[in-house]
Image: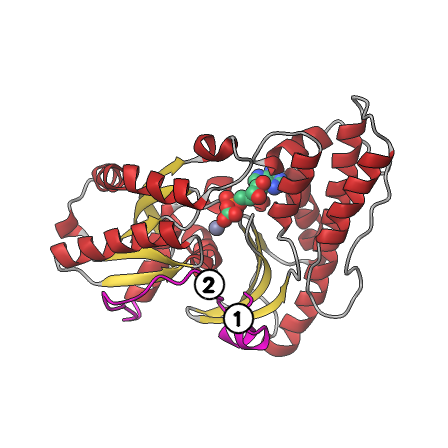
């Protein structure tokens, strides 16, 4: 079984072909990604209109390359999957419409994929792990702890009540004058810094539940930077290292709480799985490795290229659905908001 996947929900245009391997995980036959970072850098963030136009410019070539790279034609594809949300509506419509048109022209099943579900299922593509498992999804737009119980069966255990973790990294970078996207820059600066110089707050630490809050921490960094201004060369690394240390402490504490809730409802998870761009952060990866090692919990950290947005994860989520007969009509509409856990959506009155 072979599925073509298309991703256009944010600032990466991506297309990939994935097949089901005999071991039950996936084989990535091709995985083409084109980042638009350069186009957005001057604005310090993603501009939705620029993103949508950039997807239109490159998507057809990218899909051609993905098919050629996989050594197959549309005839040899069993289904077309496209991310239908959540994300920037203009970009989502570009990829979704393209995917539907391909499916229609080639007379293949169409699968509308939830971008978050694709992140959630990536560990099955790479490592073939069994349900249920605990997912930490940390990106520029999302910070969630989710019990993944099956395809289409998700329970959100925690989320951020304000900024996403990647967003906090990006905002801290911006206030310290580091270039966009800020996460990798903050990590780089932190390598030469003293994580104990500033005692930043650890919002939500030891609070019941598994929700996150980042905005107070971000503000604390800004106030401290203003207090000690003008900044000397060693101040930025120290501010970054102290901020990152606070984030790490919060993440481990929230996972501890989420695990407790997970075990009460579902028994032991098969693994802790991490996804999203922030999962590329070395300090966070090391802390998670230590935490899981101590608790004897398997840890699945997909390679950074599969943690950030990519087409292979969309193709794989499409494949998981297709083999269960879960396909969609060509009238499937783009969903700028589309939480994985529909109960959580109702509780929050639509705020994903
Ligand atoms: O998953 P992703 O590529 O895109 C979405 O947001 O969907 O994640 C991008 C986010 C950005 O906020 C970026 O600053 C952050 O991930 N990020 C990092 C690192 N690499 C990327 N944050 C901290 N440390 C990193 N090394
Ligand atoms: Zn993403």
Residue at 37% across / 51% down in the picture?
A: 90
Task: Please tell me which residue lies in front, 64 or 348.
Answer: 348
Residue at 80% across / 24% down in the picture?
A: 234
Q: Which residues are magenta?
A: 323-352
Secondary structure beneath disc 1? loop
Q: Is residue 345 left or right of residue 22?
A: right
| Residue carrying label 2 | 337
Q: Position of residue 155 (x, y in %)?
A: 55, 72
Q: Can you tell which quarter of the image residue 327 is in? A: bottom left
Dot 2 surroundings within 10 Å: few (below 14), some, or many (20 or more)? some
Q: Can you tell which quarter of the image residue 280 is in? A: top right
Task: Please tell me which residue lies in front, 248 or 346.
Answer: 346
- Distance from Cα at disc 1 to Cα at disc 2: 8 Å
Residue at 44% across / 32% down in the picture?
A: 39
Does 186 appear above or below 326? above
Dot 1 surroundings within 10 Å: few (below 14), some, or many (20 or more)? few
Q: Where ligand 1 lies, by quadrant?
A: top right
- 1 and 2 marks in contact (CB < 8 Å): yes
- Res. 302 visible in picture: no
Q: Earlier in the sequence, mark 1 or mark 2?
A: 2
Residue at 40% across / 51% down in the picture?
A: 313
Q: Which mark is residue 350?
A: 1
Secondary structure, magenta segment, majority class = loop
Q: Position of residue 342 (x, y in %)?
A: 49, 74
Q: Is residue 140 left or right of residue 288?
A: left
Quadrant housing the N terminus: bottom left
Task: Please tell me which residue lies in front, 80 or 98.
Answer: 98
Quadrant housing the C terminus: bottom right
- Res. 249 visible in picture: yes
């Amino acid at each position: 079984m072979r599925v073509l996947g298309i991703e256009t929900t944010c600032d990466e245009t991506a297309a990939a072909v994935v097949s089901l391997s005999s071991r039950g995980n996936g084989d990535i036959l091709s995985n083409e990604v084109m980042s638009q970072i350069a186009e957005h850098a001057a604005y310090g963030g993603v501009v939705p209109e620029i993103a949508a136009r950039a997807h239109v410019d490159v998507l057809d070539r990218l899909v051609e390359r993905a098919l050629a790279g996989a050594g197959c034609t549309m005839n040899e594809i069993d289904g077309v999957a496209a991310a239908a949300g959540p994300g920037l509506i203009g970009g989502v419509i570009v990829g979704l419409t393209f995917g539907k048109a391909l499916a229609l022209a080639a007379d293949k099943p169409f699968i509308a994929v939830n971008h978050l579900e694709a992140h959630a299922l990536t560990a099955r593509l790479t490592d073939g792990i069994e349900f249920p498992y605990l997912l930490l999804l940390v990106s520029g737009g999302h910070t969630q702890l989710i019990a993944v119980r099956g395809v289409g069966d998700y329970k959100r255990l925690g989320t951020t009540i304000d900024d996403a973790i990647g967003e906090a990294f990006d905002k801290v970078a911006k206030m310290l004058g580091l270039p966009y996207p800020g996460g990798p820059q903050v990590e780089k600066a932190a390598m030469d810094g003293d994580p104990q110089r500033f005692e930043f707050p650890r919002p939500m630490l030891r609070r019941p539940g598994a929700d996150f809050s980042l905005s107070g921490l971000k503000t604390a960094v800004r106030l401290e930077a203003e207090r000690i201004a003008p900044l000397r060369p060693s101040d930025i690394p120290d501010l970054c290292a102290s901020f990152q240390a606070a984030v790490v402490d919060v993440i481990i504490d929230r996972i501890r709480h989420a695990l407790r809730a997970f075990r009460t409802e579902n028994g032991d998870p098969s693994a802790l799985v991490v996804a999203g761009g922030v999962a590329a952060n070395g300090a966070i990866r090391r802390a998670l490795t230590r935490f899981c090692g101590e608790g004897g919990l398997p840890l699945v950290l997909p390679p950074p290229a599969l943690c950030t947005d990519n087409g292979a994860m969309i193709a794989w989520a499409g494949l998981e659905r297709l083999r269960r007969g879960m396909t969609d009509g060509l009238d499937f509409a783009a969903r700028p908001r589309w939480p994985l856990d529909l109960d959580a959506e109702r509780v929050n009155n639509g705020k994903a």
